[in-house]
Image (cartoon, helix red, strand yellow):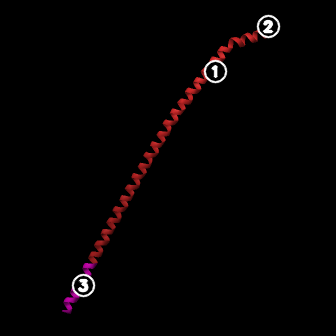
Amino acid sequence: MAVEALKLIRETEEEGRRLLDETKGNAAVIAKETEQEINRLKENAGEAEKSLTRAISDKYAKEGEIKGKAIQAKADAETEELRAVAESNLDSAVNLVLGRILGLR
């Protein structure tokens, strides 16, 4: 009976060691898989960040382009107005200068 008890204790210890080794192996596999998943999530987050950055940049570039075109159009219109005013005053200015040069006024 004592031999059987010792044999049972020894078998139990061996089973415990086997289970412990198996658990350590499983823990290592889980840790490795977890690390791989973390790396995958980081990579996906980096790609999402780049995509979001690109989208925001594109949005503001388009807005800037639209505003730039509006400013350019306004400047062109103002330039044309000033040119028209200058052209309309050209005859008067030439006559005034010629009059002063010739002493007519």
At x 64% / y 21%, what residue is drawn?
Answer: 82
Viewer-nearest of discs 1 and 3: 1
Horizontal and vertical percent position of residue 1: 18, 92
At x 61% / y 20%, what residue is drawn?
Answer: 81
Above or below — where is 2 with respect to 83?
Answer: below
Pick whichever of labels 2 and 3 is earlier in the sequence. 3
Horizontal and vertical percent position of residue 36: 36, 59
Distance in Å between CA atoms under marks 2 and 3: 132 Å
Q: Start and end of the magenta stretch?
A: 1-16
> Which circle marks residue 10 in the picture?
3
Q: Residues within 10 Å of mark 3 (few under 14, many from 20)?
A: few
Horizontal and vertical percent position of residue 32: 35, 63
Report which residue position mark 1 lands on: 82
Q: Which SS type dominates the magenta stretch?
A: helix
**Residue 74 appears left or right of 45:** right
Q: How crowded is mark 1: few (under 14 residues within 10 Å), some or many (20 or more)?
A: few
Horizontal and vertical percent position of residue 78: 61, 24
Q: Quadrant of residue 42?
A: bottom left
* Type of amino acid under label 1: Leu
Distance in Å between CA atoms under marks 1 and 2: 29 Å
* Type of amino acid under label 2: Leu
At x 33% / y 65%, what residue is drawn?
Answer: 30
Report which residue position mark 2 lands on: 102
